[in-house]
Amino acid sequence: PVFSFGVLPRFSLKTRPFIGPTSTCAELAFLMANQGQVEHGSLVFDPFVGTASLLVASSYFGAFCVGMDRDYCLLHSKVHKPKARKKDLFLNFKHYGLEKPEIICGDNAFPPWVHREMVDAVICDPPYGVRAGARRTGSRKAHQGKKANDVEIWKYGKKHVPSSIPYPVEDVMADLLDVAAEYLVLGGRLVYLLPTVGDFDTSKLPTHPCLSLIAHSSQALTGGFDRRCITMKKSRKWEASLKATRRDKSKEPAPCYADVAAHVFRKQPSSSTSTKEEERKKRDEKKEGDVDPREKREKSSEISSKSANSEGLLLANPPKKMRQS
């Protein structure tokens, strides 16, 4: 089908039966599908599928969609309320009358695919820790430097849910480029969203020998960071020795997308903070300078008695009228 802006209200997030906090809006999803040159018969892969907002747009153009996510509960619609209605990402495709995608529960850090260059476009919104923290499969003990025992998965079968450890944004992007370079066809496109903080330069983007940058655009968001839509094209045949560039963390500075969450959630002093502190100091000084009213009365009586004695007006035995007065 030919895309027109009149389609967007129909695919608005407000009309979907199943969404999440990280669901991509329809405008951006269709834009990314357009950047990936998705058409009828294209094979589109989303390694961080979530609620499949990006695959909805690709499926609209007639693509065969495949998604993957490591969140078992999200994919299988695990709800804690026993009487709650079961909702999953397939409900969105049924709602719009689109072909259902193929969904796999897996980790992009450990791709389960056999090497074959067959994907026409990789379109995704990787987790970068602002709305949802990135995690990958791994041993928590080994991550802490402790000895970890091997897990005999065959004892657990389908019930086994592997443990997870933090997944730095730099590693997320490097693994994404490695997967795209390995499974994209020659000329295929990688379209993904990347958060950046501060000054931006295309030289700071993650790179891979098999992928070349085509376009990038920016969207300013609240919190002082930008979300950029990066489009890359596979221009070289994949080889096992070709890997995404990874910096030496002990020597090289962190890129502009390394720790966006720390910058967003950092408490920044407001303009009124200094005035509030000054007012608080003034109140404290007043409190220190204030004297108890009893002490004030005692001091005033002492002062008046001293002045009276000095003038010889204070009588030892004052008359009754004076006492009453």
Image (spheres, rainbow, N blue to C red):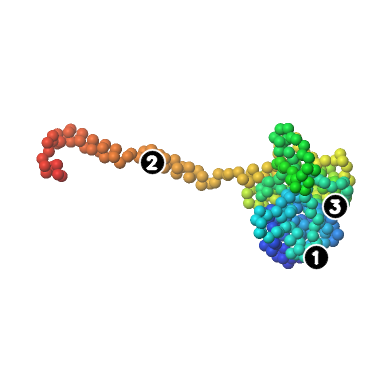
In the image, residue 239 lies at what x, y percent?
Answer: 88, 42
Residue at numbered disc 2? 286
Q: Mark 2: which amino acid?
A: Lys
Quarter of the picture containing the N terminus is bottom right
- Mark closer to the chain start, 3 or 1: 1
Residue 105 to residue 26: above or below:
above
Q: Mark 1: which amino acid?
A: Val
Please rate how many residues cluster around mark 3, counting C-alpha atoms within 10 Å: few if below 14, some from 14 to 19, many from 20: many
In the image, residue 100 lies at what x, y percent?
Answer: 79, 60
Front residue of 53/160: it is: 160
- Mark closer to the chain start, 2 or 1: 1
- Mark closer to the chain start, 3 or 2: 3
Res. 173 image quadrant: top right
Residue 196 to residue 306: above or below:
below
Q: Secondary structure at mark 2?
A: helix
Residue at numbered disc 3? 119
Task: Please say whether residue 205 is visible from this viewpoint.
Answer: no
Q: Spot the residue most to the bottom.
A: 6
